[in-house]
Structures are given as C-alpha cells and as structure tokens.
Image (cartoon, rainbow, N blue to C red):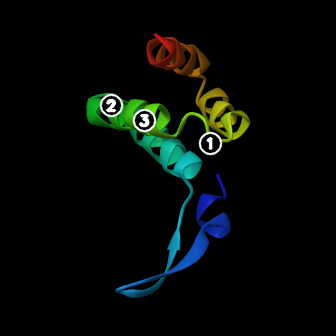
Amino acid sequence: MNLLHSAEERETELGRLRVVSAEGLIGFKLQAYVNNPKRAQDIEDIRSLLRANYNTLNMGEVRRYFRLFEREALLDEIIIDIDG
C-alpha cells in the first residue's frame, strides 16, 4: 500500500499534515486486523466508515485492499449488513 505517499496535505491547528483518505484508513485498519485478529475494534471501525461514507467511497479501491489481504468475503458480509 502506498497510502502515505498519496495522502493529501491539509492545514490543521497543528500545521500542515498529511491525511489518508477514508479508503486508506479502511486499508490500514484491515491490515491491522489481519496482523492481529484480536483487534476486533478495527472491523467495527471499518463497518462504521463504510456505513457513514458508502455513497462517496471508491469501492473499487476498498475492494482491492480486501482482495490484497484475501478478505473479500468479509467485505461482502459487511456490505450486505449495511444494505440491510
């Protein structure tokens, strides 16, 4: 993942910071979960990010992260849950 390189610079109260996209944050959280499945909160965070931003996310990019970590079935489950 080249997420940090593609992070946008934003002006904040702390000065200029590089901020990853919502898609990138999902990718980082997925990687953390894959590295340590006890990090169940990361999956809940991914669910929340997807639910809150589903209509504006680049789902192709999100799916590539899940494919990279061989977790596409998990993404499909989350999407079904969101669509209700």
> What element does badge 3 sit on?
helix
Q: Are marks 3 and 2 in contact (CB under 8 Å)?
A: yes
Q: Is residue 83 above or below residue 49?
A: above
Q: CA distance from mark 3 to mark 1?
A: 15 Å
Q: Is residue 81 above or below residue 26?
A: above
Say which quarter of the image contains residue 4.
Answer: bottom right
Closer to the chain start, of discs 2 and 1, is 2
**Residue at disc 1, secondary structure:** loop
Q: Earlier in the sequence, mark 3 or mark 1?
A: 3
Spatial CA span between label 2 and label 1: 19 Å
Q: Alpha-carbon distance for marks 3 and 2?
A: 5 Å
* Amino acid under disc 2: Glu
| Label 3 sits on residue | 46
Marks 2 and 1 close (CB-CB < 8 Å) = no
Residue 38 position, x and y percent, is: 26, 29
For disc 2, the marked residue is: 44
Circle on res. 1: none
Closer to the camera, 80 or 67? 80
Q: Residues within 10 Å of mark 2 (few under 14, many from 20)?
A: few
Residue 2 image offset from top left, x and y in percent: 66, 58
Above or below, 12 relative to 65: below
Q: Disc 3 marks which amino acid?
A: Ile
**Looking at the image, which residue is at 57% across and 56% down?**
21
In the rendered image, which quarter contains the C terminus?
top left
The 10 Å Cα crowd at callout 3, few under 14, some 14 to 19, many 20 or more, is: many
Find disc 1 in the rendering and name its residue. 56
Q: State the residue at coordinates (61%, 71%).
A: 8
Residue closer to the observer: 17 or 2: 17
Residue occupying the point 60% across, 35% down: 55
**Coordinates of residue 13 in the picture (x, y in percent):** 35, 86
In the rendered structure, the answer to whether residue 34 lies left or right of residue 44 reads right
